[in-house]
Image: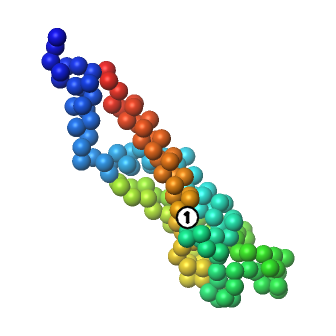
Amino acid sequence: MGKFTETSLGIYARDLQQLQGQEDRIFKIVLDNRQFKDLIETLNTTDQLGNSIDSNGNPLFSALTQRTTYSQFDQQGRAGQPYKLFDTGEFWDSFQVTIGQGFITITSNPFKLDNNLLEVFGPDIEGLTEENTQEITDEALQLFINWYRRNLQAR
């Protein structure tokens, strides 16, 4: 019988140990892909803002109008409907997800001709609800499992 270090399990253990301390680098390698970023952007825009909620699950509230719905005088015919922050789609299209070594950041361009949507609706329009955070956590777990299987498979 050969040495343990020469067995499949020994090689696997050695490879795994060599990755110790590289968690942030692996985080970026595994998650920094278009599909995962698109999922986060879609959850923040279509799923949350499209359903008139912020990252805390609260209804979108305008500090200017002190309401959660469009005015009865809304020129686009949305009177009484909850805010969705989608007129031309420019705001939703501005959402970007950055995945770095150990972090995920969501940013957008909130500046409109006459106001800043982050000031009007609050900073929580960028970010995910607990439910959506759980969804990306579940997706990330599968991506990590697949990455480790591909990169640490016993030879």
Q: Give x and y (percent) for residue 94.
A: 59, 64
Which residue lies most toward the right here?
77
| Of residues 1 and 78, the one drawn nearer to the viewer in this rendering | 1
Position of residue 138 in the picture relative to residue 49 (left or right):
left
> As drawn, which residue projects farthest toward the top?
1
Relative placement, left or right, of 74 versus 118 is: right
Q: Is residue 152 left or right of residue 113?
A: left
Residue at point 18%, 21% (across, down): 4
Secondary structure of residue under mark 1: loop
The residue that label 1 is drawn on is 129
Q: Is residue 109 something that shows in the picture?
A: no
| Residue 139 in view, yes or no | yes
Which amino acid, mark 1? Thr
Residue count near mark 1 (Cα–Cα under 10 Å), binned few <14, some 14–19, many ≥20: many
Residue 105 versus residue 14 in the image, above or below: below
Considering only vertical position in the picture, is 2 above or below 93? Answer: above
The percent coordinates of residue 132 (x first, y second) are 56, 58
Residue under the point 59% across and 62% down: 44
